[in-house]
């Protein structure tokens, strides 16, 4: 099933959009099955789970961290993580930079923005992002690289609302590109869209989509 699901999604993804297969809570055997079907980019939202999967699975997998990252867990993922989607405070970015320096790495990161109506979703607003990007501390950070933005839409059936939120994230990306990252080719990613809304996200300019249950089936959190 995993293979068929992947193939179905791949046929509708245009060039320039990259699929992150979100394997959180799923067993190693499921990740291996997706790997055997050609998938190389996986997303996880718990640091220790991601570390354990990284240790058990082929080393050409690119691991993307997509969940809320606690500073005391950064150390578990910095040696190997490919992209952190979920930088939601200046403190977190600073802590990632510090840990990356210990490993002599430059770690790619996205700034997560709060675009949904729900209070519970993490993320920066534009003012916080400007403060971060204007800060002297940010200018000193040599071991992180900001590659774009990430956001999660409201959990709703209202497609117009979802589309509006994705448009908002894309406009944040465009503004930051112009004001802070013009001419910097690494700043190119808009991470948005999940199993139920990735087609809308693609229409609105996503470059990374994060799809879990449409590949691996529903999650069981018990
Ligand atoms: C779980 C998760 C996804 C994938 O969700 P699905 O609805 O299963 O596709 C995408 N992004 C983030 C940040 C997640 O936590």
Image (tube, rainbow, N blue to C red):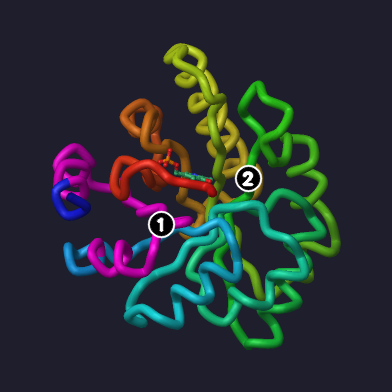
| As drawn, 169 above or below 20 | above
Secondary element at image label 1 = loop
Find residue 215 and report its horizontal and vertical position in percent.
29, 47
Along the line of sight, the residue nearer the viewer: 192 or 212: 212
Q: Is residue 78 above or below residue 125?
A: below
Per the rendered image, the range of residues in magenta is 5-34
**Precedes in sequence: disc 2 or disc 1:** 1
For disc 1, the neighbor class at 10 Å (few under 14, some 14 to 19, many from 20) is many
Image depth: mark 2 or mark 1 in front: 1
Disc 2 versus disc 1: distance between alpha carbons?
20 Å
Which residue bears the numbered disc 1?
23
Ligand 1 within 8 Å of disc 2? The answer is: no
Residue 19 is a magenta residue: yes
Residue holding disc 2? 112
The residue shown at (31%, 30%) is 199
- Verify CB contact (< 8 Å) between mark 2 and mark 1: no
Whether residue 8 appears in magenta in the rendering, the answer is yes
Q: Is 161 left, or right, of 13 in this rendering?
A: right
| Front residue of this view, candidates 206 and 121 | 121
Which residue is at the far front?
Answer: 222
Q: Secondary structure at mark 2?
A: strand
Residue at 54%, 23% (x, y): give it: 165
Question: Residue 166: x, y in percent?
Answer: 49, 27
Q: Is residue 47 left or right of residue 140?
A: left
Q: How many C-alpha atoms fall within 10 Å of the one at disc 2: few (<14), some, or many (≥20)?
A: many
**Relative to 195, residue 37 above or below:** below
């Amino acid at each position: 099933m995993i293979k068929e699901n992947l193939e179905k999604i791949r046929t509708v993804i245009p060039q320039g959009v990259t699929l992150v297969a979100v394997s959180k809570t799923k067993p190693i055997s499921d990740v291996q099955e997706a790997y055997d079907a050609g998938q190389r980019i996986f997303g996880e939202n718990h640091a220790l789970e991601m570390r354990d999967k990284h240790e058990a699975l082929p080393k050409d997998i690119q691991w993307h961290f997509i969940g809320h990252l606690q500073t005391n867990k950064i150390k578990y993922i910095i040696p190997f993580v490919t992209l952190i989607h979920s930088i939601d405070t200046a403190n977190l970015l600073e802590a990632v930079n510090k840990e990356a320096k210990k490993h002599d790495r430059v770690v790619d990161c996205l700034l997560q923005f709060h675009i949904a109506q729900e209070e519970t979703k993490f993320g920066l607003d534009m003012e916080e992002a400007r403060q971060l990007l204007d800060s002297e501390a940010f200018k000193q950070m040599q071991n992180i690289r900001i590659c774009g933005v990430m956001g999660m839409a409201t959990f709703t059936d209202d497609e117009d609302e979802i589309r509006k939120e994705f448009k908002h994230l894309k406009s944040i990306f465009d503004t930051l590109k112009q004001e802070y990252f013009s001419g910097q080719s690494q700043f190119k990613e808009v991470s948005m869209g999940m199993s139920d809304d990735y087609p809308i996200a693609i229409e609105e300019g996503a470059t990374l989509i994060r799809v879990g249950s449409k590949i691996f089936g529903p999650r069981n959190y018990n």
